[in-house]
Image (cartoon, rainbow, N blue to C red):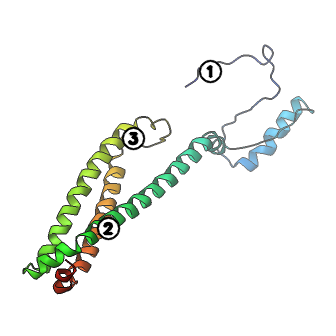
Amino acid sequence: MQPEYYLPHTQSAGSEMMLAARTRSELAAMVSAIRSEIQSIDRDQPVFQVRTMAEVRQQSVLLQRFSFSLLTLFAIVALLLAAVGIYGVMSYSVSQRTHEIGIRMALGAQTRDVVKMVVRQGMKLTVLGLGIGLAGAVTLVYFASALLVGIGVTDWTTFAGVSLILMAVALLACWIPARRATKVDPMIALRCE
């Protein structure tokens, strides 16, 4: 916070002045009374930009609020891109294993066992990726702490929420292609070899 000090108007006259008034009544009712009181002292003194302190406060944090909104938008887009990327990679990985899954099914593997195997392997990769991502996020959040207003440096709720969303997407990305791969006729999978 920048240090501030007050000087008498006669010592340092500026081009514009501010008057702050604390009131219990509505702003509209007080504006005319304040304006008439100022004009009784100096008729040429203009009164303009009458605002409440809430409006002044809101105007003062407008840039930070815009930066935070932009950061939030980028975070949502990044989350969507990560979700689409996880789904694509997991789906491709399982589709590459369709032949292996067909052989397992031909040798007597149960559908639920194959799906469980594929989901478990996919979730191991997801947990590893989330661990690395969370470590990076916790490290990098300290650099962005100047933009965070009203939020702790490590907002564990956000980290947990994003992690759960990505885990759910990864689970779905493993389960759907694995179910699809178990529907392949084992004879067709064996003939491809």
Q: Is residue 109 above or below residue 129?
A: below
What amino acid is found at the position of numbered circle 3 in the picture?
A: Gly
Front: mark 1 or 2: 2
Residue at which label 1 appears? 4
Q: Position of residue 156 (x, y in %)?
A: 32, 47
Query: Is 44 on the left or on the right of 47, as rendered?
Result: right
Q: Are marks 3 and 2 in contact (CB under 8 Å)?
A: no
Q: In the rendered image, which quarter contains the N terminus?
A: top right
Q: Position of residue 94 (x, y in %)?
A: 26, 69
Return the residue nearer the eye: 60 or 53. 60
Q: CA distance from mark 3 to mark 2?
A: 38 Å
Query: Is 184 on the left or on the right of 11, as rendered?
Result: left
Front: mark 3 or 1: 3
Q: Earlier in the sequence, mark 1 or mark 2?
A: 1
Residue at which label 2 appears? 92
Return the residue nearer the eye: 40 or 182. 182
Residue at which label 3 appears? 152
Q: CA distance from mark 1 to mark 2?
A: 61 Å
Q: Residue at x 64, y 18 (%)?
A: 5
Specify the quadrant of the image occupied by residue 180: bottom left
